[in-house]
Structure formats: structure tokens, C-alpha cells
Amino acid sequence: MLFSFDGTFVVQLINFAIFFALLNVLFLRPVGKAVVQRRAYLDNLVGGYEKAQSEANALRREADEVRNEARREADAAIARERARMHEDGASILAEFSKKAHETIDLANDQVHREVEALSGDLSALREQLAGQLLAQALPEMKR
């Protein structure tokens, strides 16, 4: 017979129970506790990683929003300044155009005055020249 239920079997059974109890106290519980602690630590790390990822994503979105808002504000400021510069340029152009027209009008008036003055002088010079020519021609005719 393979198994005999005698005193040795009982001693071996008690020996196995003591060994299993010692194994449980000295190895299985500490290893199980270490496995549970390691699992909790890893779960904590994974949770921390996921939390950090979600915070980083939120910060990226916030940074994108801030950057986009700053870009919109800068574009609006640039557009306002361009419009103001265009208005300033138009007013400067109008001012210098007005000054140029005034200068041209003054020059034209001066030219007209000088032409009229010269026209009067020209009439007098014509009469004088005609008189001189007649004076020269008349003595020659008398000869």
C-alpha cells in the first residue's frame, strides 16, 4: 500500500502544517504585503502620471488660448496703428498738397503780376523804340 496511516504520517502531517505556518508567516505574508504595497505604489504612480498629463494638457490648452488671445490683440493693435498711420499719412498729404497749391497759386500770381508789369513796360519800350526808329528814318528821308 502506498499510504499507511500510522504515527509517521501524523508526524509528517504536523510537520507539514508547522512548515506551512512558518512559510506563511516568514515568506508568503511579507511577499504578499510587498506585492500589495508595490501594486499600490505603481497605481499611485500611474494615477500621478495621468494627473500630471491632464494638468500638462490643460496648461497647454491655456497657453494656446493665451497665445491666441495675444495674437488677436497684437493683430488688432497693428490694424489700429495701420489705420491711424493711413489717416495721418492722408492728413499730411492733404496738408502738403494744400501748401503746394498755395505755393503754386502764389507763384502764378507773382508771374502774372510780373507779366503785367512787363507788358506795361513793353508798351512803353515799343513806343520808345518806334520813336527812335522814326527819328532815325526821318532824318534819312530828309536827305
Image: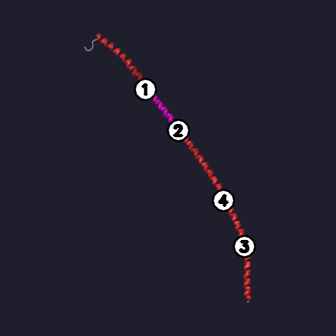
**Residue type of the residue flagged with mark 4:** Ser
The residue that label 3 is drawn on is 119
Residue 8, above or below 78:
above
Indicate the position of residue 52 as horizontal and vertical percent values.
49, 33
For the residues carrying marks 3 and 2, which lies nearer the camera in this image?
3
Of labels 3 and 2, earlier in sequence is 2
Q: In the displayed image of the protein, which residue is found farthest to the bottom?
A: 143
Task: Give the numbered dot on residue 97.
Answer: 4
Q: Which residue is drawn at 58% across and 45% down?
A: 74
Q: Residues within 10 Å of mark 2 (few under 14, many from 20)?
A: few
Cβ atoms under marks 3 and 4 closer than 8 Å = no
**Residue type of the residue flagged with mark 3:** Ser
The magenta span reads: 41-61
The answer to whether residue 18 is left or right of residue 74 is left
Distance from the alpha carbon under mark 1 to that under mark 2: 32 Å
Distance from the alpha carbon under mark 3 to that under mark 4: 32 Å
Q: Is mark 2 on a helix, strand or loop?
A: helix
Task: Give the numbered dot on residue 61.
Answer: 2
Cβ atoms under marks 4 and 2 closer than 8 Å = no
Of labels 4 and 2, earlier in sequence is 2
Of labels 1 and 3, earlier in sequence is 1
Cβ atoms under marks 1 and 4 closer than 8 Å = no
Task: Give the numbered dot on residue 39.
Answer: 1
For the residues carrying marks 1 and 4, which lies nearer the camera in this image?
4
